[in-house]
Amino acid sequence: MSETEPLSLYVPEPEFRPGDTPDYSDVKIAAAGEVDRPALNAKADDIRELAYPIIRVLNRDGKAVGPWADMLSAEELREGLRDMLKVRAFDARMQMAQRQGKTSFYMQCLGEEAIATAFRKALKPGDMNFPTYRQQGLLIADDYPIVEMMNQIYSNGADPLKGRQLPIMYSSKKHGFFTISGNLATQFIQAVGWAMGSAIAGDTKIAAGWIGDGSTAESDFHSALVFASCYRAPVVLNIVNNQWAISTFQGIARGKAATFASRGLGFGIPSLRVDGNDYLAVYAVSKWAIDRARQGLGPTLIEHVTYRAGAHSTSDDPSAYRPKEESDAWPLGDPVERLKTHLIGLGEWSEERHTQTKAEIESKIVQAQKEAESHGTLHDGDKPLVRDMFEDVFEVTPPHLLAQRQEAGY
């Protein structure tokens, strides 16, 4: 390039576009059991290498191998499989409900079920999650009532949030699920602040923040890492790298960084990558990070490597920007099938039992949907009262809201 030629910008492009044949043969994936498990009190500088390989437990034959294995009993594994089946069945029914006009909007976590469900099992009561809109598994794995979730989606008369939140933006203090915000990356700074508050109060509760790969480009992401690192906040910061933002592949947000986890290294934060489609690996890595936080050893950054098998939302058409076959070509497989295969290999499950359990769960989800719809949907049935929008917002209702409520006739 000569001195007189104009400058130009480099714009990253995904490897595959609609019409291409996806090929992930060159993707570097560590063998299951290959990545060491460090001591709980390991220093960030001593485990820098963990920000690059993917920690895996289940091998191609469905066997659990390596230093991160053998942390869950057979019953806990069966419960994890049932949790993922519940999430998948719930998603399918709510996706259908949106297509039928019963709610305005929905977002699935198809292919990502292991991440939230396994992470939730490593937490204790009182710990607080600051989730985005694809962590419904945190609630379902903690036995939050399915009917209540559906009522919130329908914004009906039994909606626990009284119609004041968009569909899928749940909230439950009891279940450690902070109110979802559509402004992404705010979850990280909120989680760090909550964790700092817990430490200042001398409590034992920790926080967990959640964002997607695209949100790491937001300034809030970096601000959170500064405070978490500086004050050694008891927090676990989760990046769900599902390869795609709404229509932008993960390379746009990642830039020239080798991995998203490696961004934590510059802040002195222990950073790991885990196979997000491996229930056992997600649980083991999450437990390690959560135990570190609870023992006052500071924050951990986890990059959960997975794939968004469905659309970004019901407003999105992924066929416009990625090949239809890309999901099937993704090398880490289906989290449900992988855990099922593992349990069958242990002699703790069978194809017949899986089929029966799946049918039972789907039947219960259908019954929950009927109950929720008896309270109303987007266009039919009971609605929250208009006056409810003014209640439970401030401890003492300010004068301007009192005036608005009176003007509205309440």
Image: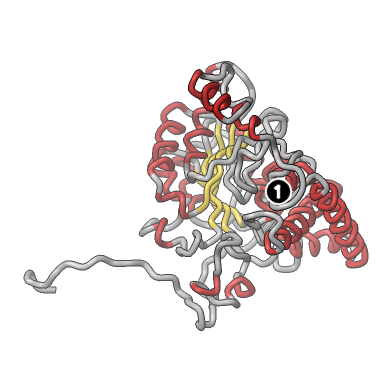
For the residue pair 118 and 33, the one nearer the viewer reads as: 118
Specify whether 135 is left or right of 84.
left
The quarter of the picture where the C terminus appears is top right
The image quarter in which residue 103 lies: bottom right
In the picture shown, does residue 24 fall above or below 160?
below
**Crowdedness near tag 1: few (<14), some (14–19) or many (≥20) residues, C-alpha within 10 Å:** many
Outermost left residue: 4
> For the point 41% across and 29% down, which residue is it?
230
> For the point 79% across and 41% down, which residue is it?
145
In the picture shown, does residue 189 fall above or below 340?
above
Horizontal and vertical percent position of residue 166: 60, 45
In the picture shown, does residue 103 fall above or below 179?
below
Specify whether 82 is left or right of 210.
right
> For the point 56% across and 52% down, which residue is it?
240
- The residue where tag 1 is placed is 154
**Residue 273 appears in the rendering:** yes
Specify whether 206 is left or right of 83.
left
**Residue 280 appears in the rendering:** no
Query: Which residue type carries mark 1?
Result: Tyr
> For the point 69% across and 60% down, which residue is it?
101
Horizontal and vertical percent position of residue 377: 73, 50
Give the colour scheme shown.
Answer: secondary structure
Horizontal and vertical percent position of residue 344: 85, 63
Specify whether 9 is left or right of 163.
left
Label 1 secondary element: helix
The quarter of the picture where the N terminus appears is bottom left
For the residue pair 49 and 278, the one nearer the viewer reads as: 278
Horizontal and vertical percent position of residue 247: 48, 64
For the residue pair 358 and 115, the one nearer the viewer reads as: 358
